[in-house]
């Protein structure tokens, strides 16, 4: 599967928070060599909310562990905040807030006690005050005395984020941060990440849960069997996938009639037209907004828009290998 990479002029001019070149990790067994990460070229713009998307076993966590200097690469290179992932891994761990998939907190310690332990280990200055600040940021200050084992999954994940914020990092790397959280918890978590991004932090998130956190992403990379198969801004990828699919339009009118649908279906470009929940859905073989509006205006159109593919559509298009060529 060929690698597809979109980079706008704006992105190219930005310094990258994360940048890798042919980054590879192999594991040797008695019978064969397994490439968990295969020649990955990754570009994460500063200031973005970047989603690393892939099914379980795609190689996401292995890639993150190499970026954090936890696992050494077999070959290739990478930089995080301009620091080399092999030679300067200690600097990376000083500058980056990392929230692993398995948080590693102490079950019988309170939220505050756990953070104090991590702050001491990370040699955070004014640790008690910083712990207080981080607990307030993630909305756990009123629950600071609650033991970790008594916390909900959402509270545990927010505590994990508080731990990642202890060093006031410019970059946050979060591995599956919304796994197991209920819908309300996910909503609160997304709002928190958006606020942290508005403060100027780059946020890099690994996930396979597209419906939960994907709407906040500005950029994505899709990983499949150890390879990055596509990456770029969400807007660019939406447009690219839309150009390879049928064009779908949604119209709301003051009234609907079979005469209207028949007139729309008379256009050669229209493949299908039907009403659905007070909306008219029109599927076309090519862009046809102007032609459709000429008809719709006669019937009193209230609103009209093109429906772009969702991030899930983009994900399954590339993972299934429906698009192979480089653009």
Image: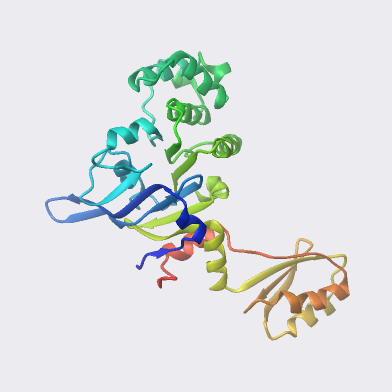
Q: How is the image coloured?
A: rainbow
Q: Nearer the viewer, residue 277 or 96?
A: 96
- Pick whichever, 125 or 315, lies toward us: 125
From the viewer's perspective, is 184 left or right of 71?
right
Figure quadrant of the N terminus: bottom left
Q: Quadrant of the C terminus?
A: bottom left
Quadrant location of residue 4? bottom left
Query: Residue 160: x percent and y percent?
Result: 45, 29
Q: Is residue 274 left or right of residue 78?
A: right
Residue drawn at the location 57% of the way across and 34% of the way down: 192
Tally the marks.
0
The correct choice, above or below, for 260 with respect to 195 in the image is below
Judged from this view, the residue extending furthest toward the left is 30
Residue at the (52%, 27%) spot, across then down: 155
Q: Is residue 94 above or below residue 250?
A: above
Query: Residue 195, percent across and down?
Result: 59, 36
Horizontal side of 239 relative to 161 (left or right) equals right
Residue 141 position in % (x across, y down): 56, 18
Residue at image position (60%, 74%) is 246
**Residue 98 appears at what percent x and percent y?**
39, 34
Vertical placement of 177 versus 317: above or below? above
- Compared to residue 149, the image places residue 213 above or below, namely below
Quadrant in the picture for residue 290:
bottom right
């Amino acid at each position: 599967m060929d690698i597809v990479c979109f980079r706008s002029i704006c992105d190219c001019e930005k310094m990258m928070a994360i940048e890798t070149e042919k980054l590879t990790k192999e594991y040797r067994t008695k019978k064969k060599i397994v490439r968990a990460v295969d020649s990955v070229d990754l570009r994460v713009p500063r200031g973005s909310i970047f989603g690393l998307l892939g099914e379980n076993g795609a190689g996401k966590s292995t890639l993150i562990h190499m970026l954090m200097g936890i696992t050494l690469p077999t070959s290739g290179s990478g930089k995080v905040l301009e620091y080399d992932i092999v030679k300067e891994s200690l600097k990376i761990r000083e500058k980056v807030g990392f929230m692993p998939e398995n948080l590693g907190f102490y079950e019988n310690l309170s939220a505050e006690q756990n953070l104090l332990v991590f702050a001491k280990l990370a040699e955070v200055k004014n640790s008690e005050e910083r712990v207080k600040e981080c607990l307030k940021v993630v909305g756990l200050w009123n629950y600071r005395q609650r033991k970790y084992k008594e916390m909900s999954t959402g509270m545990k994940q927010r505590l994990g984020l508080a731990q990642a914020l202890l060093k006031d990092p410019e970059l946050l790397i979060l591995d599956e941060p919304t796994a197991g959280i209920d819908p309300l918890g996910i909503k609160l978590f997304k709002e928190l990440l958006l606020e942290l991004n508005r403060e100027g932090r780059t946020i890099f998130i690994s996930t396979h849960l597209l419906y939960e956190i994907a709407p906040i992403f500005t950029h994505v990379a899709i990983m499949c069997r150890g390879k990055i198969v596509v990456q770029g801004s969400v807007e660019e990828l939406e447009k690219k996938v839309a150009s390879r699919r049928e064009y779908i339009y949604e119209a709301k009118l003051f009234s609907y009639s079979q005469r209207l649908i028949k007139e729309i279906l008379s256009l050669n470009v229209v493949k299908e037209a039907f009403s659905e929940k007070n909306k008219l859905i029109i599927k076309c073989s090519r862009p046809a907004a102007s032609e459709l509006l000429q008809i719709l205006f006669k019937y009193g159109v209230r609103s009209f828009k093109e429906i772009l593919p969702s991030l899930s559509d983009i994900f399954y298009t590339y993972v299934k290998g429906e698009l192979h060529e480089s653009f």
